[in-house]
């Protein structure tokens, strides 16, 4: 699925346990990702976090496996505005400064 450009926030548990979800595209307008937003979505191969995301809550990717990848655009590390435990429970590969 492609989240529309009008969306700026993905709330807590919005897609949690959506096992049928295999592909998701986040808009460049997104600024907030809530707790457990994509938790246990183990059939998504990868996701790209746009550089516009200023706030990431705790464990939005809990349950992700080492076979999944999180691409983070425009950052070399998590900013101070992201929760200290944003990547807790997540074994996915994280690629910083992705294109």
Image: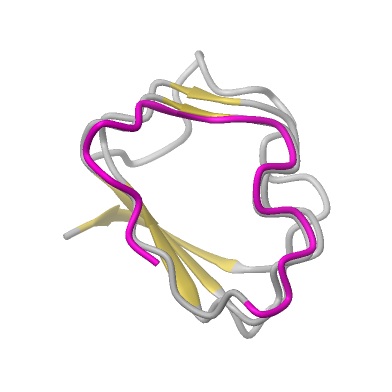
Q: Position of residue 92 (x, y in %)?
A: 63, 68
Query: Residue drawn at (48%, 32%), measured in percent from left and top?
Result: 78
Query: Residue drawn at (83%, 54%), measured in percent from left and top?
Result: 89
- Relative to residue 43, is residue 53 drawn left or right? left
Q: Position of residue 39 (x, y in %)?
A: 75, 55
Q: Which residues are magenta?
A: 1-20
Q: Is residue 74 magenta?
A: no
* For residue 37, above or below residue 71: above
Q: Position of residue 57 (x, y in %)?
A: 65, 26
Tell me which secondary structure the magenta stretch mostly adopts. loop
**What's the coloring here?**
secondary structure
Q: Position of residue 36 (x, y in %)?
A: 75, 42
Query: Residue drawn at (43%, 37%), measured in percent from left and top?
Result: 77
Residue 74 found in image quarter = top left
* For residue 67, above or below residue 88: below
Residue 25 found in image quarter = bottom left
Query: Residue drawn at (53%, 80%), measured in percent from left and top?
Result: 22
Residue 11 found in image quarter = top right
Quick one: 57 or 16, which is closer to the camera? 16
């Amino acid at each position: 699925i492609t989240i529309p450009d009008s969306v700026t926030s993905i709330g807590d548990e919005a897609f949690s346990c959506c096992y049928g979800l295999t592909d998701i595209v986040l808009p460049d307008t997104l600024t907030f990702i809530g707790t457990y937003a994509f938790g246990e979505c183990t059939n998504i191969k990868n996701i790209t976090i746009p550089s516009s995301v200023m706030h990431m809550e705790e464990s939005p990717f809990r349950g992700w496996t080492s076979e999944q990848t999180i691409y983070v655009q425009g950052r070399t590390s998590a900013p101070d505005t992201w929760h200290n435990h944003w990547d807790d429970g997540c074994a996915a590969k994280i690629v910083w400064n992705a294109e």
